[in-house]
Amino acid sequence: QTGGQQAGMAALADEASYAYAVFGNDRNRAVEIPAADRGALAGWMENRLHRRVGMPNLNSAGFQFMGGRVVATRNGPAGMLFYNDAGGRRIAMVMRPMIKRDQNAKMRAYSEDGIAGFSWADRGMGYAIVGALDAADLHPVANEARRQLRLRA
């Protein structure tokens, strides 16, 4: 840590949980660009993150893509994708370049204030899947997202 601020994977987990707490329960405006405009969303995120982004299809894990937005973090811009299941449960995937630390990191679990999450990093890009779900329900979804993102690289 520098200056009392988190860095690396700890920061990514904190940023994802905070962004989910702000936008995850917004039933009207969680996303700025809907799933129907997936290409525009990818272009916007890639422009802001200066990296190619992946948008996993999580239908096989029971979650349908809703769309996304770009959010600010202490470590620069991050892309945030939202997914809903048939029961109305919402999860988000947050992604951002990892600056200087944790360019590659194994998946790890975290939980705070009723929000569970799994974060990892591959080839300099950090990812976190978060939601107000039990970790046991969220872990297979995170594994599927990671599998698809690795295939894409």
Image: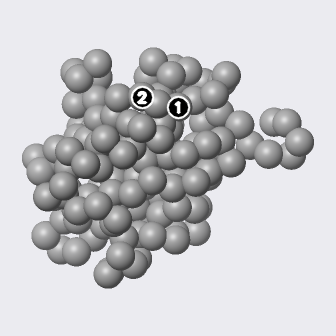
Which percent across, then down, holds residue 76?
Answer: 61, 43
- 106 left or right of 112? left
Quadrant occupied by the C terminus: top left
Amino acid carrying label 1: it is Pro
Q: Which residue is mark 2?
A: 51
- 119 left or right of 133? right
Mark 1 and mark 2 residues within 8 Å of each other at the beta carbon: yes
Which percent across, then down, holds residue 12?
Answer: 58, 43
Judging depth in this view, the residue of 49 and 27 nearest the camera is 49
- The alpha-carbon separation of the residues under discs 1 and 2 comes to 8 Å
What kind of element bears circle 1? strand
Vertical side of 41 occupied by 85: above or below: below
Instruction: Identify the residue shown where x is 43% and y is 47%.
Output: 79
What kind of element bears circle 2? loop
Q: Which residue is mark 1?
A: 97
- Evaluate whether residue 133 shows in this view: no
Query: Of label 1 and label 2, which has the lower sequence position?
Result: 2
